[in-house]
Image (spheres, helix red, strand yellow):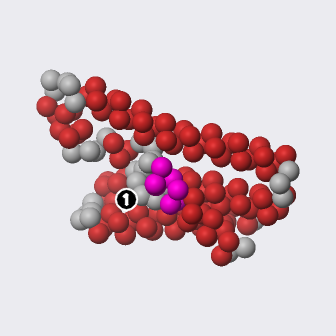
Amino acid sequence: MKFVLIPLLSVAVCQVIKFIIYFWHGGKLAKGSILWEGFWVAKFPSSHSALIASSLYLVWLNSGFNAIFGFAFIVSLILVYGLLEDKKRQGVWESYIIKSKDDELRKIVIDRKLYEFSGHTLFEIATGAIIGLITAFLFI
């Protein structure tokens, strides 16, 4: 049961931090925006990496350094690489959109609306992983 509850708790901690930051920066209690911008958008800290790190820590505690841990570690690296790659891909996509003649599309890019919707920066991933490890360590 701890393999489910502790990783979900680490995600919840990250989401609470996202909500606090969302409201700190002037987020509003609009029905569509609070769920999307306050919860789902890829911002600081990364809930994905918190989930991965806490799960990997639990696997290590349960199994030690064996083949299962090695497999979980490699899968974790692939997932984290995907988060970084998504952010890079989004930057390339935005560079094409900014050259568009459509002012509405350009405004979305200029307002940085698209950039926050995909992937994470290395700092966001590292912070999420630290939160995941601390959460798993505290609630074992």
Q: Quadrant of residue 19?
A: bottom left
Q: In the rendered image of this protein, does residue 119 appear above or below residue 140?
A: above
Q: Quadrant of the C terminus?
A: bottom right
- The residue singled out by tag 1 in the image is 38
> Looking at the image, which is closer to me, 107 or 35?
107
- Residue occupying the point 37% across, 52% down: 36
Residue lying at 54% horizontally and 38% vertically, measured from the top left: 82
- Residue stretch in magenta: 122-128
Question: Where residue 59 sits in the image (x, y, percent)?
Answer: 77, 57
Q: Main secondary structure of the magenta part?
A: helix
Residue type (three-letter) at the residue carrying disc 1: Gly
Q: Is residue 114 above or below residue 22?
A: above
Q: Nearer the viewer, residue 137 or 40?
A: 137
The secondary structure type at the circle numbered 1 is helix
Vertical comparison of 112 with 53: above or below: above
> In this orientation, which residue lies closer to the viewer: 5 or 91?
91
Q: Residue furthest bottom?
A: 138
| Identity of the residue drawn at 78% across and 46% down | 70
Q: Is residue 85 left or right of residue 67?
A: left
Q: Does the image show residue 93?
A: yes
